[in-house]
Structures are given as structure tokens and as C-alpha cells.
Amino acid sequence: MKPIVSFLARYGVTLVVVAGAALVGWQLWDRHQQTPWTRDGHVRADVVRVSTDVGGLVTQVMVRDNETVRPGQLLIVLDRPRLAATIERADAAIAEARAQLDQARKEARRDVALGDLVATEAREQSIAKVKTSEAALTRAIADRNVAKVDIQRTEIRATVAGIVTNLDIHPGDYLVAGAQAMALVDTASFRVEGYFEETKLRRVSIGDRARVRLMGEDAEIGGRVESIAAAIADDQRDDTGNLLPKVAPTFSWVRLAQRIPVRIHIDRVPAGIRLIAGRTATVEILPTIAARAGGRRS
């Protein structure tokens, strides 16, 4: 009797161990193959490329690299005297145009008053001269308005609240029109983008809760699915410059599921975690009960 009990006990323990291993294996398979999660995630943020549409010598740099700034804060001041002289020249042009217009109007009134004593051609020329002088005055006023806008734009200010990044400009440098002076990371735009295999997208819905863990951090960031990309670049076609995101495959000799960008809105950031655009993140989506049931049925 005892040998039989011992035999059954050994096989019972073996069956329990095998069943436990099978259950763990199934859970691991379900997590890897079915649960929408990815280690391929990154913190992202909008970057404002601070530049100027007027060229000039940099006279003052009012911020430091990695400094936090508020909207409207002064960042850079360009050389103002040259543009101030442009306004003075525009004022002189306006005064000249007004004097010529006054003279043209006097001559036109005189020709009209003389009537038939002045040839019709001469009267027409006087009227045309008045119109030309009026146009010259309008152009001179417009030139002054442009010069006024230019001098206002010698003061480059922040358009958003953010952090100055990659500041490499100093007093004495020359900025040409359109040149990028610095980058400004918009702190209100921080989010996480996870690149999910297309086979797992059926379990991802707008509004689903998400758990994000940055590399090197223990605490989790809370968020929710904000949007799913509508298109990605086709690596089998030539680049057409359509600005679609490119997600490179891991292996070229194996047909892998495409990875689709999923944008995660950040709801909660634990104390001590620093959001830096480009940091690596692991993202796990917590689908609703209905979504989970639907995913299993399919």
C-alpha cells in the first residue's frame, strides 16, 4: 500500500509542477503575444525653433542654456541702431512725398482754375502727377511701418513656456534672417509615444489607461491613450517627403509586424521623475473589460 501511495504522491507532485509551469508559460505567452505593451517607447515634446525674420548683430543674450522661461520673456536682443536709422530714413521719405504731393495738388488746382488757357494734355498730366505723388506717399508710409515692425522684432521673445535647449549663440554673433538661434522645449507638450506591434492594436482604444515606466526609474507614470497614428512610412517605397513617421524594422530577413505610434497623454508624474524628450520608456495599455473580452473572442 505504501509503495502505491508514494508512487501517486510523486506523480501528483509532478503533475502539479507541470500544471504550474504550463500556467506560468500561458500567462507569459498571453502577456507577450496579446497584452498591448512595448519597450519601444520614448518621451516626446514639441520643440519651438526660435529664429528671427530680420538679420542683425546679437547684442544681448538674456537667457542661459537649460533655463526655464515663460511666454513673452525676452531671449535675445539684436542690433537696433541700424534699424532705428531705417525709420529715420523712412520719415524723411514721407516728408519728401508729402511735399511733392502738396506741390502737385497746387499745380493741378491752378491748371483747373485757368480753364481753357491750359491745354487739356497739361491738365491731364497735372492730375496724373497728383495720383503718382499720392502713391509715393502711401509707399513711404508702408516702408516706415515695415521698419517699425523690424525694429520690434529685434527683441526675440519666447512664444511658449518652456526650457531653453542647445543654446549656442553669444553677443557679437550675427544672425541672418531665418536662422535658428536656439531650441525651446514646450513643457506643456510632454507626452509619451509607444510603438506597438500592429497585431496588438485591436486591444488599444482611445481613452484606455496606460502605465509608463522610464528607463532607470522605479515609479510609474500614469496616462491614457490620446491618439493612434493614421499612417506610417512605407519602407518599400522611395521617400516622397510626406512627413510620415518612419519606424525601422528590427530585422530585415524576418517579416515582422509593423510598429504603429500610439500617443499617450501624461496624467500624473511621480515626484522625482524628470521628463526629458528622448528618454526611453516601457508602455503598457490597460484595456477596458469589454476590449479584453472582444480581443479574446476574435
Image (tube, grey):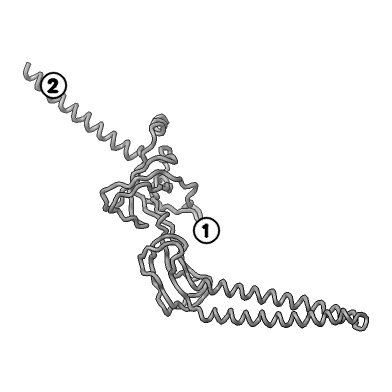
Image x and y of residue 216, in percent: 26, 53
State whether residue 115 is above or below residue 27.
below
Q: Secondary structure at mark 2?
A: helix
- Of residue 233 and residue 119, the one placed in the foreground of this image is 119
- Residue 79 visible in the current orientation: yes
For the view shown, which residue lies furthest in the right direction?
A: 116
Image x and y of residue 200, in percent: 40, 40
Q: What count of labels does the image hold?
A: 2
Q: Residues within 10 Å of mark 1 (few under 14, many from 20)?
A: few
- Of residue 271 and residue 45, the one placed in the foreground of this image is 271
Q: Is residue 197 left or right of residue 93?
A: left
Quadrant housing residue 246: bottom left
Q: Amino acid at mark 1?
A: Gly
Q: Are marks 1 and 2 in contact (CB under 8 Å)?
A: no
The residue identified by callout 1 is 241
Image x and y of residue 20, in percent: 22, 31
The residue identified by callout 2 is 8
